[in-house]
Image (cartoon, rainbow, N blue to C red):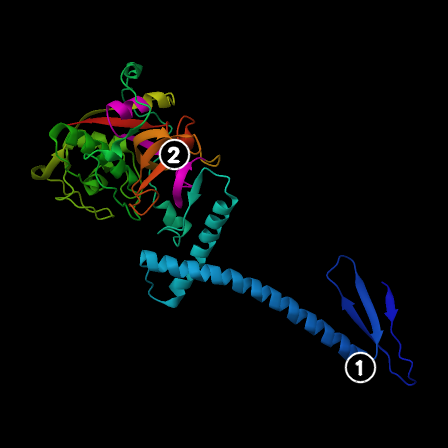
Amino acid sequence: MQELFLRSTASGTDCRSISVLTTGPGISLSVSISPVMKLQVLVLFATLAVAVAQDFLQEDENRDSTDDADWERFKSKHKKKFKNKDRERIRKNTFVQHNRQIRKHNQIGKSSYKLQANQFADWSNAELEQLKGEIDTDNEIPGPVVSTDILRQSVPDAVDLRKSSCMPDVKYQGGCGSCYSFAATTPIEFQRCLKTGKLVTLSEENILDCSQKYGNAGCNGGLALRAWNYVKDIGINTEQAYPYQGEETLCEYSASNYGGNVTSWAYATRSNDEEVMKAVVANYGPLAVSIDANDWEFYSSGVFSTPTCSNTSTNHAVVIVGYGTDESSKKPYWIVRNSWGSEWGQDGYIYLERGVNMCAVSKRAVFPTAH
């Protein structure tokens, strides 16, 4: 350790030694100074500390002002109310964390899609998981596979079934893992409408409450094809007669409120053939698919494509209602209908990159024949 002595020229000066330890590795400084100089040094250190602290505080204020402004806009837009300040503080902290991630993604600007602080931005990770709810399984569930002869039929370059009067409005599953029930009803509703000329929405709650014996698990997840097995055997009520509650209740199916049935269902592909999936959408209608939705919560616009999305594991059920190619990025896409409400994404839909098994979209693609 080096010693530095600062001595006064005045006689009789009492020199004292103080040690100043720095944060540098292995550095220690011992300084011998007079009481007057000691006071001057302490004042200097205090001044520097205040200046540094002010810089940090200014940074925090700048960050907080942006976060505060975004938070207030978020609360106003989505009509968020809280029971007390503590609960709001918890929600705000979650929002700030998500909001900064969203801003960073959009500022980098290297992705083909953008994110936004939507209605779920103050939800915890556990709550966000409840938006999903498909039961993934590697066990093959027996079922027929559509013949590749379908490729001989007309397959346009682009299809958008959202434009059809037979496409029902996007619905919201809430904090219940019932996505599979919404993925099950849309294809039936669409097909029955094409046959009858009248759109009748069906009961997701009916499937949620009554299809456990077929392998589904209520708000803990399920599969659309298992729901169709139930509907094939029993039938399904209309949404009007059996409205959605967002939680499991006693099965209250009533034959007098019959809304439709399924005669059969089939896999569009068992070999990740997205060309066959295109043909099914073009010739039969909506296609229920299983996907990995771990990065979907804050999707806003563009063609969703990311290497972090699994191409083997799934946790959510959605419905393909069309396909096309994005003019700006030239990426081919699927038009995918979600069950997170019309405020999410593009009026409740997401554009998902097509042809690369993005998010395992071709793992379990199925469609029913309804009557």
Residue at 23% in and 35% down: 186
In magenta, the rendered stretch is 278-305
Residue at 45% in and 53% down: 99
- Identify the element where label 2 is drawn: strand
Q: Quadrant of the N terminus?
A: bottom right
Q: Is residue 90 above or below residue 138?
A: below
Q: Residues within 10 Å of mark 1 (few under 14, many from 20)?
A: few
List x then y, in percent, for residue 313: 41, 33
**Which residue has dot 1 on it?**
36
Q: Nearer the viewer, mark 1 or mark 2?
A: 2
Can residue 214 be seen in the rendering of this structure?
A: no
Q: Amino acid at mark 1?
A: Val
Between discs 1 and 2, the one toward the N terminus: 1
List x then y, in percent, for residue 362: 37, 27
How many numbered badges does the structure rendering display? Answer: 2
> Where, by quadrant of the figure, is residue 330 drawn?
top left
List x then y, in percent, for residue 361: 37, 30
**Which residue has dot 2 on it?**
352
Q: Residues within 10 Å of mark 2 (few under 14, many from 20)?
A: many
